[in-house]
Amino acid sequence: MKTSRVFAVLGVLLLGYAGFWYWQSLTEVSSATGHNEVSQVVNQCDLIASKAAAELPEVLPFQKLEKAARQSRVLDRCMQDRGYQENPAWVAEATKQAQRMAHEQGVSEAEAYETLRRQAMLQSAPGVVGYWRKRT
């Protein structure tokens, strides 16, 4: 009888420790994942932007564009609130790339640039000129 109680207490303690360890592994930031500060902020702001536009209808084509524009605007404001701004080096590079894209795809330069901008807003790869930079 006494032995079963000891085993029960040890089991509860072991399960409690395992649960605590699992919770800690979920909440701590790991450098092995490759996420830096910018990508974490982008992920947070992207979640906020998605929630901001979640209730907008997407029945007609222009409504899809309105939803994408709202998500882009909310993401931009959120990043600015957290101390980031558009990188001028990225703008110069993207302008050249947008001119090539516009010519190849038969779209306006503004549309090509906006497509590149919306894609780059959500990306943060090391070693590449990123869309966001920390305000100084």
Image: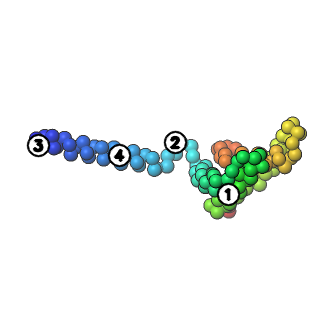
Question: From where the camera sits, is residue 61 visible?
Answer: yes
The answer to which of 88 and 121 lies nearer the viewer is: 121
Query: Amino acid under label 2?
Result: Ala
Going from N to C along the chain, the mark reached first, 2 or 1, is 2
Mark nearer the viewer, 4 or 1? 1
Residue placed furthest toward the left: 1
Question: From where the camera sits, is residue 84 visible?
Answer: no
For label 2, the crowd category at 10 Å Cα-Cα, with few meaning under 14, some 14 to 19 and many 20 or more, is few
- In the rendered view, does 111 fall on the left or right side of 51? right
**In x, y percent, where is residue 19?**
35, 46
Tell me the residue that label 2 is attached to: 32
Tell me the residue that label 1 is attached to: 74
Query: Amino acid under label 3?
Result: Lys
Going from N to C along the chain, the mark reached first, 2 or 3, is 3
Label 2: element kind: helix
**In x, y percent, where is residue 69?**
73, 53
For label 4, the crowd category at 10 Å Cα-Cα, with few meaning under 14, some 14 to 19 and many 20 or more, is few
Q: How far apart are the alpha carbons under marks 2 and 3?
A: 46 Å
Which residue is painted at 45% across and 47% down in the image?
Answer: 26
Q: Which mark is residue 19?
A: 4
* Quarter of the figure with the C terminus: bottom right
Q: How far apart are the alpha carbons under marks 3 and 1?
A: 62 Å
Q: Which mark is residue 2?
A: 3
The answer to which of 59 and 131 lies nearer the viewer is: 59
Query: Amino acid under label 1?
Result: Val
Which residue is painted at 36% across and 48% down in the image?
Answer: 20
For label 3, the crowd category at 10 Å Cα-Cα, with few meaning under 14, some 14 to 19 and many 20 or more, is few
